[in-house]
Image (cartoon, rainbow, N blue to C red):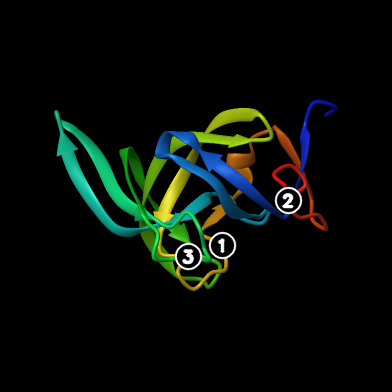
Amino acid sequence: MNNKMIIGNTEALCLPELGITGLHTRVDTGAQTSSLHVDNLLCVKTDGENFVEFDLHPDVYHLEETVRCKAKLKTSKRIKSSNGEVEHRCVIETMLKIGGQEWPIDITLSNRQDMTYMMLLGRQGMSDKVIVDPAGEFLISH
């Protein structure tokens, strides 16, 4: 337990394989899976492998800014959202970086346009590397 980072309920995370730094993220111990808001999701096949291409908004305050990303499709999953709706989502695996540490996580790609944060970090993505202080914000990233 001593080597676990204490993070807040909101952190600025990096997804280095997608070229994203400082992405304001809601840390949610009540959610099992991590989720990332994307637009213009497109499934493509390259050299016999399935990939997804999508637009990501790295700054919630400047939605006109987008980054086009491409990642290998790991699987698709049925997810029940907080409002009770069930949807099929694409799942990618990518590296998460926070506080100088980095580890792979699965992220579902979804429409979070009505949410305050473009990314939600769920329990599976936290792995066994962090402890969440629900009263804190940006404890590691600012």
Instruction: Provide residue 76's location: percent of width, then percent of height.
Output: 34, 47
Q: Label 1: state its secondary structure.
A: loop
Residue at (79%, 56%) from the top-left corner? 134
Q: Residues within 10 Å of mark 3 (few under 14, many from 20)?
A: few
Q: Tell me which label, 2 or 1, sits earlier in the chain.
A: 1
Q: Position of residue 3 (x, y in %)?
A: 80, 26
* Separation (CA) of disc 3 from disc 2: 20 Å
Front of the two marks 1 and 3: 3
Determine the CA span between mark 2 and mark 1.
14 Å
**Residue visible at 57% across and 55% down?**
120
Residue type, numbered disc 1: Tyr
Residue 136 x %, y %: 81, 54
Q: Is residue 137 left or right of residue 16?
A: right
The residue positioned 69% from the left and 33% from the top of the image is 128
Q: Earlier in the sequence, mark 1 or mark 3?
A: 3
- The amino acid pointed to by label 2 is Phe
Under circle 3, the secondary element is loop
Question: Camera-side residue: 12 or 92?
Answer: 12
In the image, which disc is placed on residue 20? none
Q: Write down the residue under mark 3.
A: 62
**Relative to the observer, which residue lies in front, 84 or 70?**
70
Does residue 64 appear left or right of residue 81 in this picture?
left
Image quadrant where residue 2 sits: top right
At label 3, the amino acid type is His
Residue 138's tag is: 2
User: What's the mark number on residue 117?
Assistant: 1
